[in-house]
Amino acid sequence: MGRKVTLATCSLNQWALDFEGNLQRILESIEIAKAHGAKYRLGPELEICGYGCADHFYESDTLLHSFQVLRKLLESPITQDIICDVGMPIMHHNVRYNCRVLFLNRKILLIRPKMLMANHGLYREIRWFSHWNQSRCVEEYFLPRMIQEVTGQDTVPFGDCVLSTKDTCIGTEMCAELWNPRSPHIQMGLDGVEIFTNASASHHELRKADQRVNLIKSATTKSGGIYLYANQRGCDGDRVYYDGCAMVAINGDIVAQGAQFSLSDVEVITATLDLEDVRSYRGEVCQPNMESEPKPCHRVKVDFSLSSGDDIYLPTHQPITWNFHTPEEEISLGPACWLWDYLRRSGQAGFLLPLSGGVDSSSTACIVYSMCVLICQAIQDGKSQVLEDVRRVVGEDTYCPQSPEELCGHMFTTCYMASENSSQDTCSRARELANQIGSLTGYFTKYDCSSADINPIGGISKTDLKSFLLFCVEHFHLPALRGILAAPPTAELEPLTDGQVSQTDEADMGMTYSELSVIGRLRKISKCGPFSMFCKLIHTWKDMLSPTEVAQKVKHFFRMYSMNRHKMTTVTPSYHAESYSPDDNRFDLRPFLYNTRWTWQFRCIDKQIPVLKVPLLVTAAGGEDAASEVEPSKTEGPCPRWQQTP
């Protein structure tokens, strides 16, 4: 009947500037896609050079080598008889663009530059690329000679265009364009585009996966259509972990799903879908809006069909339910996969961890143990690349791990870095955990452990880490963690009193870790300075602290924060797991020399204290009804209204 199409998308563990490895992974994904009957294959954003090239994008070598890889792809027999959609940087009229290149049978069909850039949080795309701001505009791009020799083409379409096959129409989005209020899929859908593709380099953050899935479901719920999502996976040389989640959706339903966390370098997801389902959905739900656009999409035609004439017996994929990981599971999986990429790609022989018997180092140890669990499971599942990498790391050509504990003994060393203030309790807790996970424990005295190479927990709050350790107690059968969780957090910086710890972290900080977590989110995620933070916390903490006490907490935090901010300039690179990360490298860009008195800001807080005696709707001394007898304050301003003294 010629209406069912088989499409492929993928998650690839690309590595910045690893052109040889990136090429092989792209070819492997295309080969798998073809083996599953796919006629179209979508890959991640900038997959040829790797998304994380950063300032290497300025170098002409990066553009040159990307075209050399593209030539290899065009020449390969693996890429024949399938539309391949790959990502690479391209310079057009002396301007660099982040592009998708679509080709078929040694011919480039079109080049589509990114139109809406990611320039928030960790992303700095505008630093290296310009956005294509000419909607529905297409120009001629003159191909480099090395590509002309293969394709026989001098120029190809470059710009905001879509691809029309003999049986359907395909339109491109790229990563941040899906998250933008002016997403291209909206107008493309109204102009009859039936298949949307999205090539992404989207990093992992705790509790983020559902946002991504919901956006894709929403994109096809509003106007129907098929949506393919590809993403990078792994550590490509920086602080982030790209978390896969390749998927296919149709008319608001997810029908195929890839893994969020995996040690596999190549994962291909295919789905067979009926184009008539899109047309029927739009005919009922979207008919009044499916009118000709004032400026319709520029269509590039290709003499090729995604469907075949005899497909009546071909089954289609049905809706599935996406099962999201809990935050505790995400902590056990994301940083573990990131550590494995770092270990195998750095050429090191293992990890060394100063195990103090506290929550932080114990969490790090559990993440390394989780990495060993994932490695053993991958080898058991027949992942030959993982076994090859393990043998290279441990230096034994015939080695095969028998258990996570045994593997830990080969790749993970812990030591207890004692000082004269260290207690027997912390030493015992460190030894017990080391025995249970299988590391080798030694003893060594050193000033501190902040001279590490990498930090898998630096972007995770203490609250989440404690929940993670509770998860590990049951999931990994590590009862030693119960004692660690029960102990008061201490860096053991002061002399012992009768052999017992006399110093605790929370007493030294002047606030609990729970309070610090709230303040950290307000500082970074909510963009609060001292005054706006005070205005929010007088509500959040109204049942625990008076306005005066809230003011003291806020002032104390900003004094200590500004005094210690300079330490972030040399801090160990850490895994990016949360939006409130204080990482000074490229995420949380702030001065490291502050006026620690914050005179103007703190004065604004102090002016509000006299009028903030008792919060509204709080029971007064006279009983429940007394609160309603007090007039609310007439004070106007940025702070919420509070009751005045009668």
Image: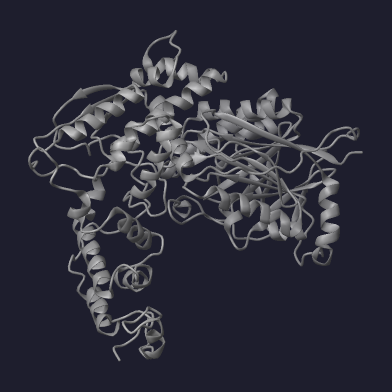
The image shows residue 259 at horizontal and vertical percentages of 58, 36
* Observer able to see residue 80: no
Identify which residue, 589 or 137, lies in the foreground: 589
The image shows residue 363 at horizontal and vertical percentages of 34, 37
86 to 221, vertically: above or below: above
The image shows residue 271 at horizontal and vertical percentages of 74, 37
Left or right: 626 as drawn, with respect to 11:
left
Coloring scheme of the render?
one colour
Q: Residue at x 21, y 36 (%)?
A: 449
* Observer able to see residue 185: yes
Q: Residue at x 14, y 36 (%)?
A: 422
The C terminus lies in which quarter of the figure?
A: bottom left
Quadrant assignment, res 447: top left
431 to 166, vertically: above or below: above
Identify which residue, 550 or 257, lies in the foreground: 550
Quadrant assignment, res 500: top left
The N terminus lies in which quarter of the figure?
A: top right
Image label count? 0
Identify which residue, 583 or 464, lies in the foreground: 464
Residue farthest along the front direction in this orientation: 623
The image shows residue 379 at horizontal and vertical percentages of 52, 19
